Structures are given as C-alpha cells and as structure tokens.
Amino acid sequence: MLYQSTTDSSVRITAAEAIARGVAPDGGLYVPESIPQLSHGEIANLIPKPYHKRAAYIMGLFLDDFSEQELDEFTSQAYSSPAFSHPGIAPVNSLDENTFFLELWHGPTSAFKDMALQMLPRLLTASLKKNGEPRDVCILVATSGDTGKAALEGFKDVPGTKIIVFYPKDGVSDIQELQMTSQSGDNVSVVAVEGNFDDAQTGVKTIFSDIGFAEKLDQHGVFLSSANSINWGRLVPQIAYYISAYCDLVRSDTIKLGDKINFCVPTGNFGNILAGYYAFKMGLPINKLICATNRNDVLADFFHSGIYDKQRVFHTTISPSMDILISNNLERLLFDLSGKNSSEVSGYKEALSKTGRYDVSEIIHSKAAELFPSGRASEEDTRKTISEVFEKHGYLMDTHTAVAYKVLQDYRAETADSTVAVVVSTASPFKFCDSVLDALGKTSTQRGAELINILAETTNQPIPAPLADMGTKTARFRDFVTIGEMKKAVSDFLGVNSFN
C-alpha cells in the first residue's frame, strides 16, 4: 500500500517512508491511498486473540512493507507487562448496560498516547533500516501534556534517535510537567514555550518547513521527524483499539457481531477520533463518532456550522490536553470527505493561515455532521460529572474523560439514541489529581505529586504504578523559550550552534 499527501495527491511513497518522514515536504499529511476492508469474519477471528495479536493484524493491513513476524514482535514487546499494568492492555469497563469506558491509560505514562508511542519507536527504527537511511533522526514534538511524556518514554535511549519536546509553559498539569521535566535518557530534551499549545505546534511546523534548516541538519547527518499524530506511525496503532473494544463487547455478549455502537471521544488535535473514523471506513460497525470538546470548542462549532474559525479566545482549562484551537488532523478527514481533492484541502489550509478561518463545502459539512455529532462541556459541567459519577457508580474519571461522558449524556438526551456507547477514556485521574480532588469537594494547599496520595486516600483508588513515585522526582529540564527561539533550542540540543 502506498501513501499520498493531503496537499499533493501525486505523491506516492511506502509506509516506511511515510513513517520516517512524518510530514510531507509540502507540509501535507500522509494518508493511505486506499482503506483496507475488514469483514465480519475477520473481526470474529480477532475476538479470542489477545490485544497485541489484534493490533498486529490491524496494522498489517496498512503496513504491507512490514512482515507479519515484524509486527507480531513489535506489538508483543510494546503491549506487555510491566509497561502495561492491565492484562487486557486497553480494557473495556462497564458503567451500566449501555455505557462503557475504553481505558487507554494503563501504560507507562498513564495516558492514551502510550498506545501509539510504545509502537512508534519500533516502527520508526525499522522504517529507517528499510529505507537505508544512514542519518540519525531528531524527533520534534509539540505537546499539550500527554504526548510529550509518552514520546520521551518511548524514544529514550533508542539508538540513532534524539527527541526534543516543547510544551506550553503554565499550560499543562503539575504532574504532566514533572513527568516530562524529570525524564531520564541521554538523548532527550524538554523545553517550555511561552504561549499555548497552538503556539508550540506552530513553532514545530515552522521548523519542519524550513528547507534551509533541513539542509544544514543534513550536512551534520541528522534529519527531522515527528512523534505527534501528524505522523501516520502514530495514528495506525490507534485504529487497533477501536476494533479491539468492539471485539471485547462481542466477546462479553454485550452486542452481537454486526451491531452498531457509538464512540464518544474527548477531542483536541483530532487524532484520536480520526483513528476511529479509519476503523469506521474499514467496516467496523460504528453508528456515531461523538466529538466532545471543552471550552475550546472550535471542533464542536465546525461540525455544527461547517466553518472552522480559530479566531476566538483561547481558554486554559482543567482538561489541558484538549486546549487546542488548530486541530491538525482534521485535514486528513477533509481530504477523505472531499474525494481526495488535495487542491481543495490546500485552499482550506491557506485560508486558515491567511484569515484564521475557512468554510467547507456543503457536501463535506453534511457528511461530517452526520457521522460526528458534537458537543461541549464547561468547567462546571466537568467537575459535576466527575463528582456525580463517582458518587453514583464509584467510578473515578479524569477531566478529559468527564468531558466526553457529559457530552455523551447531552447527546442521548437530545437524540434519544439508545445505542451502546463507549467513552474513550484517555488518562488516569491521578494525572490531574488537583482538578479531580476539587471536583470531589476536597481542597488542599499542596500541589503536584503531593496530591497523588491525598486523592488515593480520598477515593480509595489505587495509584497507577508509573505515578506512585512522582513525589521523589526532580526536574532535569528547566529551560523556557519564546516561539522565535524554538529553532535555536533544537540546534543547541543537536550541538550545531552555527545554525543560529
């Protein structure tokens, strides 16, 4: 299977090339030329298999230049103990007969990004070998909180790689920040950026598009790639957990094979829910993909109106991983819904760059709105949801999962849709213990790691192993830069200061 760029459909490269490059030279995102189909018989064959076997099979449909043996080896290494604390890797937890949580936070950083970023380093290093790439790779990451730590953990001390993570100063939780700044590894760096996530993301994209910088890096035997969800190697492992969740619901006799289900996904950069879209396109029986946003509701507004407008107030919220106004992965959806019209997608991107907004065609809007009902949750809604669900069911949610659950409840009230629904749970509540404790009516003068034990005592919930020793961690990295200084931070990290 070959891959093409969303902004230049004449591009044809292999999966290994797409994973190694991360982003197309023209700034477009790589997408498969065609979507492999998954029959009900194939789903039935996956039902009795463990998670890593399911994931290897699904990824193999997209990555045909990787052997079955390679993918089986990669997934068995990535999705295993002790990295993942739950034997189901991505278990489905029942709240009631119609509502389930797909828990994606049992990995080494207690967030859903582990599901992809335990795989990406393996896919990337194998891709470099397949491509005969002699240079080292420097991974550039912009994070709104969870991607940074998961990428650092995945790439630490991987031969032939370096990784530098940029995060918004004062824009992540205390635990998220400490997880990143205390990261071990000789090939890692972490830098705070003055601004929000969109600023950090824009800065990284600007570095990627700097041809002169790339040429100078090449002279030093280095090239840039990405671990954000703009890299296809990040997205393809995520498709697997939607299909795995469906398999688990069939195996538990919750649904019958062929029954449709809904997924409700807390959404920021549109990568997670986009993976669900590709599962739907493959033939997984999905009724709706419900897009849940917080106060930064640019996506909810888009699906309601067909207008993407980033010209609005940016809010720093208690669900910081969703504090995003420029959802990069949306262009992959637009490319598919436009009939792979790269010039149309380029036009939307140009309009966004020049005017801060674009209006999609009526055809695209109607298709998107039909599959992606959407809604938003306020800070008050989020806190109330955490408290009410814990009091009624004894189930503790983080702030992002609570946004999704609230939006699901609103959707059901508006539509009377009684379809079995899966809330995609993206992080452990212990990553956001200050906000979760506040939602439960508990106040404390303490901060950060000190609150982890308080939350455990308050809720009688076990602390995830990766977070249990956070109180002993100290920051290695304390630098912060402006957006304009990000390229200098990269060149300093790589030891090539003459680029400045």
Image (spheres, helix red, strand yellow):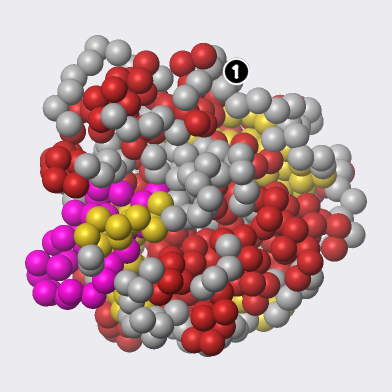
The magenta stretch is 401-426
How crowded pointer 1 is (Cα within 10 Å; few <14, some 14-19, many 20+) is rated as: some
Q: Nearer the viewer, residue 8 or 79?
A: 79
The number of numbered badges drawn on the structure is: 1
- Left or right: 406 as drawn, with respect to 249: left
Picture coordinates of residue 51, whole percent (x, y): 56, 61
Residue situated in front as seen by the camera: 64 or 312: 64
Q: Is residue 250 above or below residue 323?
A: below
Do we see residue 74 in this rendering?
A: yes
Counting from the top left corner in percent of width and height, residue 153 is at: 62, 37
Q: Residue at x 64, y 29 (%)?
A: 189
Residue 263 covered by magenta stretch: no
Residue 290: % across, % down: 29, 67
Is 214 or 60 nearer to us in this picture? 60
The quadrant the C terminus occupies is: top right
Give residue 132's quadrant in the image.
bottom right
Q: Is residue 38 left or right of residue 163?
A: left
Q: Which residue shows up at 51% across the image and 73% down it?
A: 47
Residue 478, placed above or below residue 373: above
Quadrant in the picture for the N terminus: bottom right
At a point 45% along the width and 45% down the height, the residue shown is 105
Query: Which quadrant would residue 23 be assigned to in this image?
Result: bottom right
Q: Position of residue 38 (x, y in %)?
A: 54, 83
Q: Is residue 444 above or below residue 281?
A: above
The residue singled out by tag 1 in the image is: 476
Magenta-drawn stretch contains 413: yes
Camera-nearest residue between 309 and 23? 23
The answer to whether residue 374 is seen in the rendering is: no
Q: Secondary structure at mark 1?
A: loop
Amino acid type, mark 1: Arg
Q: Residue at x 56, y 83 (%)?
A: 42
